[in-house]
Amino acid sequence: MQYNMIIKMTLKNKLLMIIFLCLLFSFIFTVNAFASQGPSIFDVKASAINIRTGPSLSYSIISVQPNDADFPQFTANYPNDLAPVSGSGYDWLKVYYPNASYGEYTNLAVG
């Protein structure tokens, strides 16, 4: 009888431990989800990337970001318009890119 009681307590403790771990992981992932909100920062890994006035290769190039340049995916309607835009068979992202003379993100570009 005493042996059965030990097993029941162990099963009860295991159940409590599983519940505790589920709550802990839920909290951790919830905190990480809130902590990760904000614009993504892109690091150019190609030799350069063209910033265009619209989502197609036919749009004008308004900036060329060199290798290792950083720029945020941050738009005027953030975060509602972060979905990629399709054009010319590619997905394009809206970004503000820095105007060097002002040192701030001023121009909306898609591409």
Image: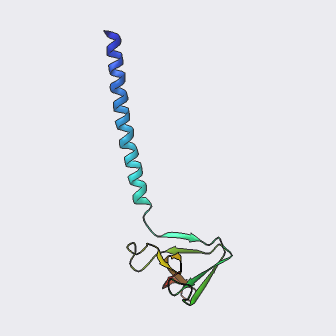
Q: Nearer the viewer, residue 52 or 3?
A: 52
The residue positioned 41% from the left and 51% from the top of the image is 29
Is the residue 22 above or below the residue 104 in the image?
Answer: above
Q: Position of residue 84 (x, y in %)?
A: 47, 73
Quarter occupied by residue 23: top left
The extreme top residue here reads 1
Left or right of 72 on screen, residue 1? left
Quadrant (top left/top right/bottom left/bottom right) for the N terminus: top left
Quarter occupied by residue 80: bottom left
The residue positioned 39% from the left and 59% from the top of the image is 34
Left or right of 90 on screen, residue 11? left
Q: Position of residue 100 (x, y in %)?
A: 58, 86
Q: Position of residue 40 (x, y in %)?
A: 50, 68
Quarter occupied by residue 11: top left
Q: Position of residue 69 (x, y in %)?
A: 62, 75
Is the residue 95 above or below the residue 2 in the image?
Answer: below
